[in-house]
Amino acid sequence: MLIEVGSWQMNLLQIISIALILVLVIPMLIGFIFGAPFVPTPQGVVDKMIDLAKLKKGMTVVDPGCGDGRILITASKRYDIKAIGYELFFVAYLLAKLRNLVSHGQARILFQDSRKVNLENTDVIMCYLLPEPLKKLAPKWETELRKGSKVISYAFEIEGWKPTHIEAKVPEKNFARILVYEIGKHRL
């Protein structure tokens, strides 16, 4: 049995297809080309990153490409901290806002470019970014972060920086390593 589709229905399907491409596919391609694609950090890694940060009440934690917000939401639920996430992929931003709302998280999720904000009051940066964005952000972090501030990177090292701690990968869980850097001790 064939179902006839009228011209207005075909036009509607075309409009929906184009909208989906514009909203989902193009931003993801831009992320791959110019920045970091949206790839969620495994929850077991999030838990370990938070442990390695040694968070205390009142600290400010930033995720410069927070994706679905899981690092910040988890940290803000466990500790009385100021958690701020920046995201430029609109679908991931909406997902983070929804996740924060549903889980009663206290994180601030902003649709904003972290390269354009002042980070001088940041105690810890936690991120899962590719090497190129890390390389571009490193000079900003060196300039704006206070001595003793930490940068915790999942999977990728920051070129020219020396980690103060490397958490080994966990092959059986498919977890990559976690690198901890401390401003003031991070130069090779």
Image: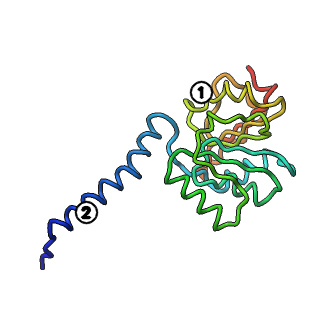
> Where residue 144 sits in the image (x, y, percent)?
74, 29
Of the two numbered discs 1 and 2 in the rendering, the one whose residue sits closer to the viewer = 2
Say how many tags the image has: 2
Disc 2 crowd rating (10 Å Cα; few below 14, some 14-19, many 20+) is: few
Separation (CA) of disc 1 from disc 2: 41 Å
Q: Residue at the top extreme?
A: 188
Residue on which disc 1 sits: 136
Rendered image quadrant of residue 6: bottom left
Quarter of the rendering occupied by the C terminus:
top right
Observer-nearest of 48 and 116: 116
In the image, residue 149 lies at what x, y percent? 80, 35
Q: Residue furthest front?
A: 8
Nearer the observer, 55 or 86:
86
* Depicted 171 relative to depicted 100: above or below: above
Q: Is residue 102 left or right of residue 52?
A: left
Q: Is residue 131 above or below residue 170?
A: above
Using residue 38 as the reference point, say whether residue 47 is left or right of it. right
Element marked by disc 2: helix
The image quadrant that residue 68 belongs to is bottom right
Amino acid type for the residue under numbered disc 1:
Lys
What is the quadrant of the N terminus in the image? bottom left
Residue labelled with disc 2: 13
